[in-house]
Amino acid sequence: MIKITQTLAREIGELLTNYRKKSHLTQTEIAKRLGLSQKSGPITISRLEKGKFKKLSLDLILSYLTICEKPWHAFFEKLQGIYFAKQHHKIMTQVAPPMHHKKIDRDVAKYMHSLDAKFSKKQTIKPMSQEKKDKMSLRFGKHRAIIEPIEKEVTYLLGDSGEPYILNQYYKAFAREIYSTLRKIAPQKSLPANSALNSKLQPIIDKWVKKGLKQEILEKIKEIPVKYFQSPMKTNNNSKSKNQN
């Protein structure tokens, strides 16, 4: 939990409200996908958007942004711009006009720089060698060659399910997480028995169910990355032949 000022809480609430409305979601829908109770969930979201909280959970804000399909960095950049503009105005209006001289201006600049340092960390990035770039490009190409067909199958499956199209990205993210988990638990492509495999993948399904996705659809989608993981080349060839026909 992060302790914040009332002004900052209101700014956060206004930005989140705008994102929710642009995504055509209600407070009840946001609360449901966050896993909040049906009775008190909408009230919690309403208080969040009105800036009523004195302490905020970063996880709550990030989950809210994810549901609205808004990038985290854009939210914090916008919030930072609003916050610093108001802080600068507040400082300058508190400094009496006769006191405007080099020392005061320098002190104000130092203060503003100290505030900025709290929100942005400057990092020195080492240049990447061409060999490393080529290896990364090759790995990414191989990865996308499998992930893209998986995402296509997910989209086809959802087209017959009746689920809103806006949830398509969430079901795709679930499929990608399943595939990533398979790579971790079976680096040699040798999957455990079905019962053991299901026990390892069940927590992922439970997590996405709490976010508002349907379990019966997740169970069907789970089989898609498993199929591609076991025989990616064969599956890819089959899909190519279907396209040619």
Image (cartoon, rainbow, N blue to C red):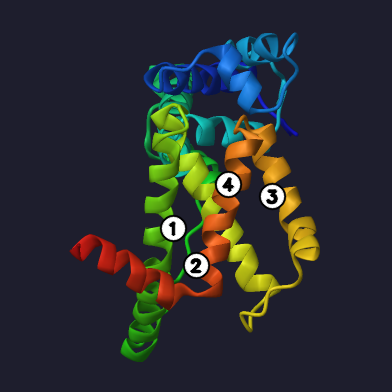
Say which element carries label 2.
helix
The CA distance from mark 1 to mark 2 is 7 Å
**Which mark sits nearer the N-terminus, 4 or 2?**
4
**Residue position for label 2:** 228
Q: Nearer the viewer, mark 1 or mark 3?
A: 1
Q: Earlier in the sequence, mark 3 or mark 4?
A: 3
Number of the label disc, if any, that sits on residue 200: none
Which residue is depicted at the point 49% across and 67% down? Answer: 228
Label whose residue precedes the other's in the sequence (2 or 3):
3
How far apart marks 1 and 3 lie (CA) works out to 17 Å
Q: CA distance from mark 4 to mark 2?
A: 14 Å
Label 4 SS? helix
Res 84 seen here: no
Q: Earlier in the sequence, mark 4 or mark 1?
A: 1
Please tell me which residue is depicted at 52% across the width and 36% down the height of the picture: 66
Q: Quadrant of residue 189?
A: bottom right
Q: Amino acid at mark 2?
A: Tyr
Mark 3 element type: helix
Which marked residue is nearer to the observer: mark 4 or mark 1?
4
Name the disc covering residue 204, or none.
Answer: 3
For label 1, the residue is: 150
Decide which of 200, 244 is in the foreground and name it. 244
Task: State yes or no: discs 1 and 2 in contact (Cβ < 8 Å).
Answer: yes
Pointer 1 or 3: first along the chain: 1
In three-dimensional space, the C-alpha distance between marks 2 and 3, rounded to whole angstroms, equals 18 Å
Instruction: Work out whether mark 1 precedes mark 2 in sequence or the reverse, and give the earlier one.
Output: 1
